[in-house]
């Protein structure tokens, strides 16, 4: 088992270093694979977005109790990786329904989404957008 420390280094420290109270937020790592023929149109659309468009996207996500902390396209042009946070502790099925649905990225038309819930016993990958 590896323990995450100082955002950059991992040390094998065993289970005693895992803290069940470390992270009460819910983070998701999503591997987005473009559906056939959808990548070029998606990147063309992204290139047209103005700052106010991005603000609207973020506000919509926030109103849906979701936040996209990072969006990272891969060099192969077929995959993107994101770190999402859900305000509520959703089940895998609930999060998948969001990410594949009309309010998710690509509105269910652009990506095949492979979602993984982050372990809560490790420090959060980003400060929570929903922390009070």
Image (cartoon, helix red, strand yellow):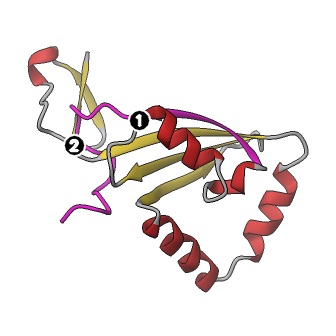
Span of residues in magenta: 110-132
Q: Who is closer to the viewer here, 27 or 44? A: 27
Residue 42's spot in the image, x, y percent?
79, 58
Q: Give the residue drawn at x 64%, y 50%.
A: 101
Question: Which quadrant would the N terminus be assigned to in this image?
Answer: top left
Q: Which residue is drawn at 51% across and 70% down?
A: 58
Position of residue 40 in the picture relative to residue 80 (left or right): right
Residue 4 in the magenta stretch? The answer is no
Q: Nearer the viewer, mark 1 or mark 2?
A: 1
Q: How many marks?
A: 2
Question: In the displayed structure, would residue 32 be above or below residue 20?
Answer: below
Left or right: 78 in relation to 27? right
Question: Which residue is pictured at 48% across the width and 57% down the height?
Answer: 68
N-terminal-most mark, 1 or 2: 2
Residue corresponding to mark 1: 91
In magenta segment, residue 122 = yes
Residue 88 location in percent, x, y? 33, 50
Magenta part mainly helix, strand or loop? loop
Q: Identify the image quadrant of residue 132.
A: bottom left
29 vs 64, nearest the viewer: 64
Mark 2 residue crowding within 10 angstroms, few (<14) / some (14–19) / many (20+): few
Helix, strand or loop for disc 1: loop
Q: Residue 6 carries which label?
A: 2
Give the percent coordinates (x, y) of residue 43: 78, 60
């Amino acid at each position: 088992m590896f323990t995450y420390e100082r955002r950059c280094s991992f040390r094998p420290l065993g289970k005693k270093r895992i803290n069940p109270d470390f992270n009460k937020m819910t983070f998701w790592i999503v591997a987005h694979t473009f559906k056939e023929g959808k990548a070029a149109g998606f990147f063309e659309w992204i290139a047209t977005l103005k700052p106010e468009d991005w603000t609207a996207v973020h506000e919509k996500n926030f109103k849906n109790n979701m936040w996209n902390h990072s969006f990272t396209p891969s060099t192969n042009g077929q995959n993107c990786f994101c770190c999402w946070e859900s305000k509520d502790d959703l089940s895998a099925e609930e999060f998948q329904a969001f990410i594949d649905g009309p309010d998710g990225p690509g509105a269910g038309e652009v990506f095949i989404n492979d979602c993984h819930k982050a372990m809560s016993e490790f420090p959060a990958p980003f400060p929570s957008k929903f922390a009070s």
